[in-house]
Amino acid sequence: MGAIDKVFKAYDIRGLYGSEVDEDLAWKVGHASAQFLRSLLSGYERGQASANRVVVGYDMRPHSKSLVEALIGGVTSSGVACVNIGLCDTPMVYFAVNHLGACGGVQVTASHNPVGYNGFKISGIKARPIGQDTGLREIKHIVSTLRRMPGSAELAECQEVDLWEAYRKHVLKFFKPARKLKVAVDASNGMGGKMVPAIFGACPEVEIIPLNFELGQGFAHPPNPLVEANLQQVKAAIREHQADLGICMDGDADRCMFIDEKAQTVRCDLMTALLARYFLKDNPDSMVVYDLRSSRAVAEEVRDAGGVPKRERVGHSFMKRALSDGHGVFGGELSGHFYFRDNFNCDSGAIAFATACTVISAADKPFSELIAPLNRYSHSGEINFEVEDKAGKMKEIEEKFKDAEIDHLDGVTCQFDDWWCNVRASNTEPLLRLNLEARTDKQMREKIEEIKKILGEPVDH
């Protein structure tokens, strides 16, 4: 059980290929996921042939194809049919689950991890996220009791389906540029390298400057756009080609980071504020969901545009649920996940890119000038501290700032009129993560120094 405990994370299954994740585990995950996902169907849904299927896809890692083949064997051995949509970005699996009316989907991917890692992202009916509290614990239990029998019978069929044209039409509903744009796109040698040309390659309204679109040759830089060092290539391309904007995607293309025409990184909470106005124009009084690390500017912009801001805890399962439960129109996280009502409440790097092009092209000013008025507070970004007694240190923070308005939506948040901070624990490491915002840079730095007296010196992570 120790090895299984290590790879089952809060939202997915992930580990080093060979030693932690292998074809045996893939088969068991396929069998267990199919068994669990089918158990969630209502009696009526079980009577529909389309619902008794699990969608599978896989990313560009060298071991993904053999893992997906084992995964398919596990799914079909459970008596549940399988639809293999092939090499694709993770949001395409979400689309396929809904487009085909399947009971769920599994993407073989390790997202932004190095090339030696792999894993599985599981979603349920309507592409609802399957995390620890929504089924991953049960799937883990089934996996721990399974034995993969040599030559296990496949009791259902697997069908290979090409959904690229349907997916392209779906994404392009969000792409309505008012003028031609020049965009530098860094796919990080991930699934954006297949998705971007397939969806936007024939669109005359956008000239794409492609970076790291090659698949299967490792990563030119780690496929994590949140790390500033990984944005240097796209920034250089923006300067060289005088592009209107740039984006950098992660390995499975469900997240992206935006860069303006001056080659300055645009924080994702400010993108949430910018895009929220666009969605609220046609959907007045709608909810916009944002994670609690985001600038106060997000809620202010949403209210000013006639919407209802909804502050939510970090994590895609919480964001998607809040968007769905509140009939919201749009949501965004500081991590680069953007969620759309008209994309089944799911996140999508492709749709975030399409919408950003629509908004930026409609303005009579450059991208940087659209963002400037939103960047009205001084935000620390996420700062990590290595802490063993996470609960104890959060209690100390709460005591230190006891005059604040305090809540425990996710960790501890202390709010004053002129500044706020949130300290939350990592799910998997002995880390506390700090986000802090103040009216000025000076005040922000002073408050960080106060908190360092409790948490110690920050660590790179």
Image (tube, grey):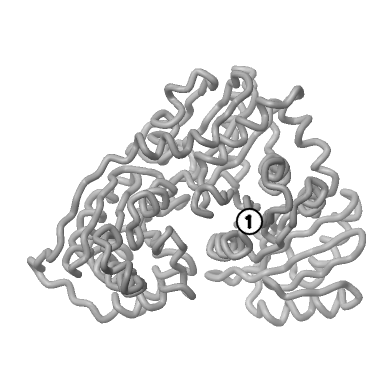
Q: Is residue 31 above or below residue 343?
A: below
Task: State which quarter of the image contains the N terminus.
Answer: bottom left
Residue count near mark 1 (Cα–Cα under 10 Å), binned few <14, some 14–19, many ≥20:
many
Q: Residue at x 65, y 52 (%)?
A: 334
Q: Specify whether residue 380 is in view.
A: no
Task: State which quarter of the image contains the C terminus.
Answer: bottom right
> In x, y percent, where is residue 27?
23, 65
Looking at this view, is 274 or 247 the one in front? 274
Hey, which quadrant is residue 101 in on the image? bottom left
> In x, y percent, where is residue 337?
57, 50
List the residue tagged with mark 1.
Answer: 328
Q: Residue at x 35, y 61 (%)?
A: 104
Q: What residue type is disc 1 on?
A: Gly
> In x, y percent, where is residue 340?
56, 49
Hey, which quadrant is residue 175 in on the image? top right
In the displayed structure image, the side of residue 315 where residue 188 appears, left or right: left
Circle 1 — which element?
A: loop
Q: Specify whether residue 370 is in view.
A: yes
Hey, which quadrant is residue 445 in on the image? bottom right
